[in-house]
Image (spheres, rainbow, N blue to C red):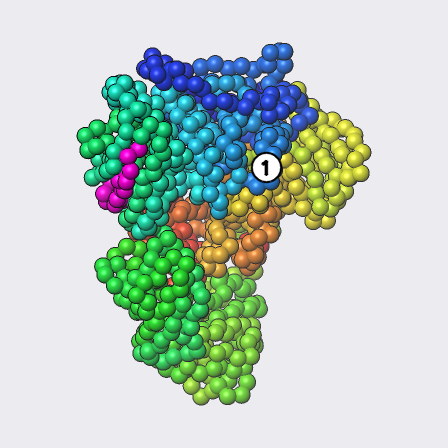
Amino acid sequence: MNLKKTFVLLIVAGIFLQFANFTNIDKAEAAYTPLKIISRAQWGADESWRVWNGNRTIPNIKKVDSEYVEKFSDELQVVRRVSTNSAGQVLTWPIEYAKKITKFVIHHTDSKANLDNPKQKIREIYSYHALTRGWGDIGYNYIIDREGNIYEGRAGGEAVIGAHAGTANTGSIGIAILGSYDNDEIPEKALLSLAALIREKSILYGIDPTGYSMFRGKKLPNIIGHKDVAATDCPGKFIYSKMDVIRKLAAQKIDTTFETTFFKRQKDKGYDYDNLSDVYYINIDPSKTRDLQIRLKNTGNVTWPVGTTLVVTDPKSFNDKIEFTSTALNFAAGAGDTMTFTISMTSKNKPGVVMFEMAPFINNKVKLEKYIKIPVNIAPPVYTYAIVTAVLPQGIAQSGTKLSGTLELKNTGNVPWVNYGDNPVTLETASRTKSIGALLNAKVNPGEIGKFTFEVTTPNISGDYVETIVPTVKGIQNIQGETIDFTIPTYNRLFDHKVFGMSAPNTADIGGATSVWVKFKNVGGATWTKSGINQIQVMESSSMFKMKNWTMEENKIAPGEVATIKFDLIAPQTKGISSFRFKLKAGDAVLTRMPVSVRVRVYGNQVAETLKDDKGGNIRILLSKFNGEPIMTANGDFSLVSAQKTLVNLHENDEVTIKYTSGVYEISLKTAAGVLSKITSTNPVRVESLNGAILEIKNYENRPDWNVKLNDNLFRGTLEAAYYNGKLRLINELSLEDYIKGIGEVSNGDHSEKIKTIMILARTYAKFYIDVAKKFEGAPYNLDDNPNVSQKYLGYGFEKRSSNTVRAAVETQGIVVTYADKLVKTPYFSSSDGKTRSAKEIWGWNDTPYLQAISDPYCKTGALSGHGVGLSGCGATGMAVAGKTAEEIIKYFYQGVELKKMY
């Protein structure tokens, strides 16, 4: 089947190899006894799971961009491919071998169950990879359990390509440690086995464990964590923090050099010892002292006299990281005697790995050329805190008022805090303009509690004084922890306000009724009320609108709170943009010295003739990430339709699976009760929601990186399976307004006016490609869900968790952007470098006069991200925060446009 072939080519795109040049391996290394690897048969791999079976899960194949493959073609070469097993059965995932191996990628399995039964755990991982995900084998090349046992992973032997790091699979060996190491230390046995395995394979493939090389366009260490090549926390912070230790341990060679030859001569003279210490590496926090005990047994026939010491190789090379002292032998150690040397090492604040290399120095004359090598990892300084108590300023305050507070913070890092010297701990503001407080304790060790006092002065402007307190190690860095902040409403005048937002865009028909709202923030020192003392009153100013009524939603508005005032208006008898103007009073005090103005666009009796009054209509969206044979269900009633005929009505949790073969759509039905049946059709098949039921694609993996527990596989409307351009496609047809609610181009936490802006632009973009032009000529869909091609569409799952986005879609329903009364294309991008680009400059368009290069003063990133044409997302955020409406934002970035309400 083409499907199987495609699966292999895509899932492992870029996972290829070369057998190493063995001629450079010296004789001693070649004679090294190989590590014991527990075979697949020994851990109980069911090899039948690797054989193709059409009834199993179809894998979700992630395509690799052709430009990427071409760019790194030298790294993505396959030298051999095996598609069948020894019995001639077709493999789900053919075995492929890459031309060259250059990297080791370290993983953790991020699991805690069954770690005491590692073979069972590996069988579970195998089942998940091979059957649940449909790969046909386990993805890792090797697995190591907590006791240090090493297990064979992916079938195929040396240089076989795995599936463990996406586009980094080819040319790498994926090694997974059983367990989760985000919060737990990796066991020493597992770490040592990991280093030993890498050492053995690095010799085989000619890789320097401490070296770097170019890999997918970046210079990377030869031993990397999964997170170095993918958006993940794998292999967990406790493994990742020891990557340098792993590199040093893996780089340790069997003694094959001059020293070995020279020591042989010393041994012939009666000098020898065994290292009984059982110490392989050391972790030490910064600014800490640790005693290292080295136990040696004299296995020669020469007595080691009093005063024998351990001499350290090249201590100057790491004196910026470690200081040390060593004890000398206080007795004469004859043949068979055991002696102990104590090395007291004190780390400094500079992190890194030191290879501590020692050898006995006997009688101040003979240095044995037999070395004890121990990697010492000095952990990076960790400056963190936890809040114990926080007494922060409260209430309201007049400008220029001094406010004070106290803090008790626990040192949860690994470095002491001090209030003296070059790096004292102080309290600063988030802007780091000055110190506002000090540590009262002379020294606070890790685990202890420090006490602080601070004092701030409210600014000379009215509004919310928001201050964030940042504990800081002067000259080094901020101390990380929970946010310490407070908000104090500050006032210059007893009665004052700020406009906090207003409805937009506002529309009305000639002489028709409409409603608008304005939000006011109380930035004075007195409370406003709905009735009684300081009652809010509205005074109309000259305006073409007639005010029928107004209401304030809240009963009282204390300093710092926001009032929402709604107005019911009657529009004038003329078309165009008009303003409703008014002033506010609180009791006898005038709040708004200048009238507040709300703009409303007044239309004639119908929308401009160039726009269709079609209530939005339907849009068809290709679900571009889905591949395979869809398995669909719903949370209510739904029907199966083909060629406009209902084939069958179905109910909640019934399942539909659609397969396309030789011009025929084969439909498998499974009721919730388990009853099976089959239908065929020669026309595309539609799964249509009834009574608002939500459709689900059960085998669609579309999980956001930031929370893999979510899966955006839920959709409104209809899901249509249609064979097009060589493969079975899945198309979501739904109303335009429901489509807009599922657009993931803006965060639910963004400013409301920014969200409205994006909703209007997304609707305009979609409507343009429904009514005016074809995005995909000849295709059975209008747009796809790919943000790099069309717009980011996630469906009902996004709608469920994005109430603010849905609200913005509803409030802007039917509103689009026009130029000369015609729909336009509305491109937008992430952020600018201070200016946007014209469409003519970037794409050579000559028919978009509204897409001009303009300044973007509200975007402070300083870097261009995206094509640069149209609306800057960063600038839109800045304008929204500054109080600009969605209409004002759009008209700024798209020169000369108007907003039209189509329905």
Per the image, label 1 sits on a secondary structure element best described as loop
Q: How many marks?
A: 1
Residue pictured at 50% horizontal, 22% vertical: 36
In terms of depth relative to the viewer, which is nearer, 810 or 151?
Answer: 151
In percent of width and height, residue 590 lies at 42, 83
Residue 52 in view here: no
In percent of width and height, residue 315 lies at 22, 38
In terms of depth relative to the viewer, which is nearer, 583 or 323?
Answer: 323
- Asked if residue 323 is among those painted magenta in the image, a careful observer would answer yes
Q: Which range of residues does the magenta coloring cover?
A: 318-333
Label 1: few (<14), some (14–19) or many (≥20) C-alpha neighbours in 10 Å: few
Say whether residue 102 is left or right of residue 421. right
- Asked if residue 721 is among those painted magenta in the image, a careful observer would answer no
In percent of width and height, residue 735 lies at 61, 47
Q: Quadrant of residue 690?
A: top right
Q: Which residue is mark 1?
A: 116
The secondary structure that dominates the magenta segment is loop
The image quadrant where one finds the N terminus is top right
Seen in the picture, residue 557 relative to 875 is either above or below; the reply is below
In terms of depth relative to the viewer, which is nearer, 458 or 496?
Answer: 458
Residue pictured at 54% horizontal, 64% vertical: 508
In percent of width and height, residue 575 lies at 49, 63
Seen in the picture, residue 517 relative to 631 is either above or below; the reply is below
- What amino acid is found at the position of numbered circle 1 in the picture? Asp
In terms of depth relative to the viewer, which is nearer, 338 or 836?
Answer: 338
Q: Quadrant of residue 222?
A: top left
Residue 113 in view here: yes
Residue pictured at 64% horizontal, 23% vertical: 46
Residue pictured at 38% horizontal, 76% vertical: 490
